Amino acid sequence: MHGHSRLGRTKSGGLAGTSSSSSKSTCSKFVFLLMSAIFRRRGLLLFAPLFYISGMLLYMGSLSFDVVLVQKHPPPLPGSIYTSPQLFHHLWPFMEFESDTNNNNATSTNLLMKVWNVKEDRQWKPCANRTLPQIEFPKSNGYLIIEANGGLNQQRLSICDAVAVAGLLNATLVIPLFHLNSVWRDSSHFGDIFDEDFFIQSLQKHVHVVRELPDDILQLFDNNISNIVNLRVKAWSSPAHYLKKVLPELLEMRAVRIAPFSNRLAQSVPSKIQGLRCFSNFGALRFSEPIRTLAESMVDRMVKLSSQSGGKYVSVHLRFEEDMVAFSCCEYDGGAEEKHEMDIARERSWRGKFKRKHRIINPGVNRVDGKCPLTPLEVGMMLRGMGFDNTTLVYVAAGKIYKEQKYMAPLKQMFPRLQTKNTLATPEELAQFLGHSSRLAALDYTVCLHSEVFVTTQGGNFPHFLMGHRRYMYGGHSKTIKPDKRRLALLFDNPHVRWEVFKQHMKDMLHNSDLKGTEVKKAGGSLYTFPMPDCMCKQVEPKNENANIGKNLKL
């Protein structure tokens, strides 16, 4: 019995020791027969050493083969595997106990009332139009047509950059065209999402804007806009490039087209051009009337529902749609079924991109690097750890969540007062927006914009634009929780961590988000995320007369 237990088994189910003995016996017979043949034919004696060495290598190979079979894989990197459900199972009793204690304590204070350390005398104020001259234009150099692609805020970026380029070239901007994106699949036009009249009127003293090309210009191109030369401008092109390459074409052809136009203007441009970016984003672009009407009603409902916390609520941008999970190349707890569904989703939206020859997909490394979208469960644990209790009103901004019933259940368990656009608005109110992802995203954007706390869980234009817009609205502070997902990956992979230790890590993360709330734009940064100092002016703090009197008395 003991001798057999040491042998182990091969993949075929036989004993490893028996297999090894058989291999040795066969190899020995083969060598014997080979040597006999060599000695019968003396001419082959010259090759004897070669045959001998080959035989020994074959023999030794048979010895080492079984060792390879039983070799163990190295342990996974800390934080590389999704184990958050086990952690939640461990921490949930502590969350429940803490909630019961707070509910029974009449003196407990809701974290929303004191979450941010914002000074009363705010340091920054909006001044997006300070660099814009209020003078009449010279004659237009021609018409600029651009094609905005992507989702809501990618389109927003393209529009604002187009205004800046039109100002740079002294061109007349035609209301941007929207490209039908394979991922977003939204056929909306500019006027369906943004207030077209307000946009044109707001910019009338700064940039020429028209709804469409005049007939006389269109006739130059056989009444077909596709015949207008499409200038392939590289990403992040400088103002000098536009003046040198685009302007001559504009003057000669009287109309030029740039498609696509995403990220086609450098971040660093002259202050006047930067001012046009600021004003178009924060001043000239507002949502269309149908979107504004419903969005404002949704905000009012959130404020009323959160009356016990002074009308303040938390909003979460949850990026856990099927396309996002597929694009991230991360693995969760769905096994073979999840892998199959993600392969199909990747091929449907990005046709072959993830199957290229040298493309390496490593889900574990992605998780350790903080590149995996947070699950609703992970967001809930993070917020509870930071101190937001089960009475907190939470609004979730998202598309269709992947396996929604499974993944949303624990978040609703932690925050039973959770709301989405589908619970906050009636089916009749939402009917006109269904099938139009950018219009639905505009509703989410507005509710998130007016929340006391905004939580971003994955990168992208939506949180970047929101953070900048919130800084512009709230005196320079974004009031945004931007978690350290590398650190979270390690914490979530520790299913036995003490609740108090977990909470301390979460509170440190909240404090760090508070400190970075008033971050100023650095070289190469985007003013859409960091509007200070390009779009905002620093206030001079009022002098404290009492302090001056005190100083004089000491003298």
Image (cartoon, grey):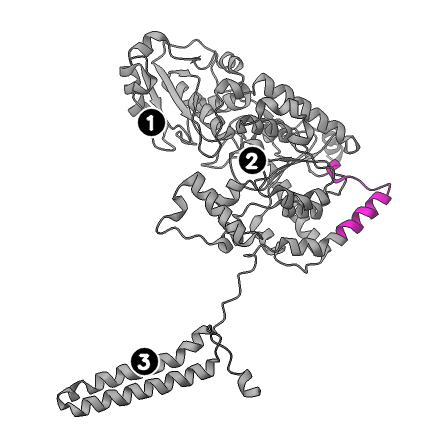
Q: Is residue 29 above or below residue 545?
A: below
Q: How far is mark 3 from mark 2, CA to CA?
A: 62 Å
Mark 2 or mark 3, which is nearer the start of the sequence? Answer: 3
Front-most of residues 383 and 474: 383
Q: Which residue is drawn at 55% across and 23% down?
A: 282
Q: What stretch is highlighted in magenta?
A: 94-114
Residue 205 spot, x, y in % from top left: 47, 11
Question: Is 103 contained in the magenta span?
Answer: yes
Q: Name the residue under label 1.
A: 240
Residue 426 spot, x, y in % from top left: 68, 25
- Observer-side mark, 1 or 3, equals 3
Front-most of residues 524 and 162: 162
Q: How far is mark 1 from mark 3, CA to CA?
A: 69 Å
Question: Is 127 contained in the magenta span?
Answer: no
Amino acid bearing label 3: Leu
Q: Name the residue under label 3.
A: 58
Q: In this view, does 402 lie above or below 476?
A: below
